[in-house]
Amino acid sequence: MFTLQDWQNLKEQIPRFNSCSPLGSCEFPCPNCKVIGFFSWREAGTRKYQACKFCGFWQEIDGEPYFCIQIYCLICYYLNWNKPDEEKHCNQCGKKAGEKDLVTVPPASEDKNNPCWKEKLKIESKHQKHLNTFKQVYY
Ligand SMILES: [Zn+2]
Ligand SMILES: [Zn+2]
């Protein structure tokens, strides 16, 4: 279970912008895929959660983990994350995109052609030393 206390601890441990990746922490690997640079605590309005924008691991406080789906918008060239139970949509253009303009993309953890994969390699090359420490701790 992921509690409010866990979320607050994570927020203390992960300084939001002290990272070479805009998508997550380079210090804390994702608890699911173990990749760095994509996982962080997140906040949207009153919603508090943790998420990995590499494998799609998502968890709201007091909730069970679930996996979000990556949706690529051919109008905006924007890669979105949608909840598994919500209707496919683009966060950039909202309802403007029709079904044919929205392509479901396998998460980077399952597809090396996913654009996040290139980002992952870039981040990893900058953090080789950290990664060796992570391997001892997490693998
Ligand atoms: Zn992950
Ligand atoms: Zn769009």
Image (cartoon, helix red, strand yellow):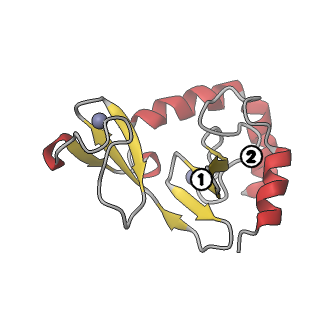
Q: Determine whether the residue tagged by mark 1 lies in a helix, strand or loop.
A: strand
Q: Nearer the viewer, residue 7 or 133?
A: 7
The total number of labels drawn is: 2
Quarter of the figure with the N terminus: bottom right
Position in image of residue 17 (x %, y %): 73, 30
Above or below, 31 relative to 61: above
Q: CA distance from mark 1 to mark 2?
A: 12 Å
* Residue pictured at 80% horizontal, 37% vertical: 15
Q: Is residue 112 visible?
A: no
Residue 138 coordinates in the image, percent (x, y):
75, 56
The quarter of the picture showing ligand 2: top left
Q: Along the polypeptide, which appears first: circle 1 or circle 2?
A: 2
Above or below 138: residue 124: above
Q: Amino acid at mark 2?
A: Phe
Residue type for callout 1: Ala
Q: Looking at the image, is 32 positioned above or below residue 128?
A: below
Q: Which residue is mark 2?
A: 28
